[in-house]
Amino acid sequence: MAIIETKNLTYTYPGGAKPSVRDVSVKIEKGEFVLVTGPSGCGKTTLCRCFNGLIPHFYQGELKGEVTAAGLKVAEQPICELAKHVGLVFQNPENQLFALSVEKDVAFGLENLGVPREEMRKRVDWALKLTGIYDLRERAPHELSGGQQQRAAIASVLAMQPEVIVLDEPTSFLDPLGAKKIFEVIYELNRKLGITTVLVEHRLDLTAKYVDHIIIMEDGKVVLDGEPREILSSKEARLIGVGIPKATRLYQILQKDRVKLGNAVPLSSDEMSALLRGVLKA
Amino acid sequence: MIEVKDVHFTYPNGVEALKGVSLTINNGEFAAIMGENGAGKTTLVKHFNGLLKPTKGSVLVDGVDTRKVSVATLARKVGFVFQNPDTQLFSETVEEEIAFALKNFGFKENIIKRRVTWALNLLGLVQYRKTSPFMLSGGERKRVALASVLAWNPKMLILDEPTIGQDYQQKEKLRQFIMQMKAQRRTIIIVTHDVEFVAECNPRVLLMRGGRMVTDGEARKVLTNPEILTQASVVPPQIAQIFIKLSDLGLPKNVIDVYEAREILLSVLEEQAK
Ligand SMILES: Nc1ncnc2c1ncn2[C@@H]1O[C@H](COP(=O)(O)OP(=O)(O)OP(=O)(O)O)[C@@H](O)[C@H]1O
Ligand SMILES: Nc1ncnc2c1ncn2[C@@H]1O[C@H](COP(=O)(O)OP(=O)(O)OP(=O)(O)O)[C@@H](O)[C@H]1O
Ligand SMILES: [Mg+2]
Ligand SMILES: [Mg+2]
């Protein structure tokens, strides 16, 4: 069953010259790990805002079509109700943090959910540790580096353990090893707890291997929607300017040179080096 | 030239963000500062245009101590793009945002016009000339911040995380621009976590950790050394990972470029076929 579904969704911001999302119909199944990508300005963030009700409740503008999330009609439910089911990590972490300390920020959502004190303490510590900022819990968010702020923003959503987590470029400020670890954590939560994950990313090198489903947007529309290996090896994806993982890129280039590497398109360095090992003699 | 001499910096809350950093960046150099979150990268580069002054030690820009000149004087020479564009943007339209510094620096009206148009084109913002920066996407806002600094063509450019929110084509345009700047002997310093971008640019790489500079070398060497990288919380770019994994087959370990990888693999395969 689809946990998020849009039907002919078109949305124009107040004062916007044209729709930022145009006639989008997508289905995200329960438990899926979905990647949304496409050129800067194509409407990824706008689409995410439709999933948790920021559109149309916070951003007015003109909305056509339908969005359902976790069985709720987004247009008919208040943001606070939707927040119980769909957690959004903002593209800009500074916009998400407002409390006097990191810890209070992470606890805020749980307080709103009415989680009992003891359980709250446990979940806050769990999220702070997962994101590697436990030692910074008493700091004010503005006293943190960019990456530390982003970790706090991620922690505040993870702590709530919503049914759906939407992450809008969640690791753009993270150091590469930190980004890798956070993606491992998110993947584990996705597999173990079945949390549906929607990830917006430009850098696919770190993420392609985790995803079940890719949605590529361009100029407000969904232009590709389907199986990752198929989509990332397609010419269309490259022409749109998607940052194809370098392992996949090398595979494509060698294919053109008639090197026989088989038909399983690699998405990671592990997969690509295994393919090369098959053709290279020791 | 930027000379950093044993710089220490402590924030008012007592956090010691820099613990004795020394380094020299020459005119015409292109350097990328990388390293773990909280390592002190942003704190360090904020010293280059005088936004922060060392608690101990000194920073000289073209021989002048940053403590002895005003931020305004330094700003003309050292352009700075913040990690978070929202701290930088305030104008009502993109065009005004880009023109602001040019006006401040006393450029003539016709030159301002020309430079604004040039910057809008370079960063793919032409259609947003009259739009408010706050009605743009995250990546677009970052490009407005970049445009507003690139427009006045400063002698030194400090870009904190320039590729955030940028798609592959925008990054490629940025890379080409940086290479042009380098050819004109401008100094470019980027702070970035984007290993793949660094691999494509092949600059001097500086790794930071815990308020200290831990490595300084060319990208091809630094980015293919997993031990050094791990210390600084960086992972090798994907092509390097592939070659490191295959090094037992006698392949070189220091490859970061996809086309170089192709050449090497093709020649090995050709050799094998004989
Ligand atoms: N305004 C501030 N007040 C107090 N401490 C700060 C402030 N800004 C940064 N810090 C602290 O100083 C240290 C260095 O921060 P800095 O922002 O220079 O890191 P960075 O290397 O740029 O990290 P990132 O990759 O996350 O952007 C960190 O421990 C951080 O928490
Ligand atoms: N608050 C707003 N008001 C009006 N227009 C907006 C607003 N936010 C974004 N837009 C416009 O809507 C379009 C889609 O923006 P969106 O933020 O969804 O893009 P994105 O795909 O997330 O881009 P990026 O990768 O740069 O973050 C862009 O053309 C942008 O200029
Ligand atoms: Mg966005
Ligand atoms: Mg920083």
Image (cartoon, grey):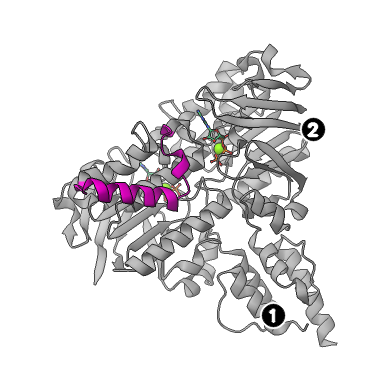
Does mark 2 fall on the same chain as mark 1? no
Against A83, residue A94 (above or below) is above
Q: Which residue is outermost to the left?
A: A76
Residue A251, x across and y down, in percent: 63, 73
Q: Chain of mark 2?
A: B
Q: Quadrant of ligand 1?
A: top right
Residue A115 on the magenta segment: yes
Left of B97 or right of it: where is B34? Answer: right
Sort mark 2 into few (<14), some (14-19) or many (20+) by Cα contacts within 10 Å.
Answer: some
In depth, the one of A190 and B184 nearer the eye is: A190
**Label 1: element kind:** helix
**Label 2: element kind:** loop
Against B146, residue A74 (above or below) is below
Which residue position holds label 2?
A: B26
The answer to whether residue A169 shows anywhere in this view is no
In depth, the one of A213 and B60 nearer the eye is: B60
Which residue position holds label 1?
A: A277
Left of B250 or right of it: where is B159? Answer: left
Against A273, residue B204 (above or below) is above
The amino acid sitting under disc 1 is: Arg
Q: Which quarter shows the N terminus of chain A?
A: bottom left
Q: Nearer the viewer, mark 1 or mark 2?
A: 1
- The magenta region covers A113-141
In depth, the one of B211 and B131 nearer the eye is: B211
Q: Which residue is outermost to the bottom?
A: B274
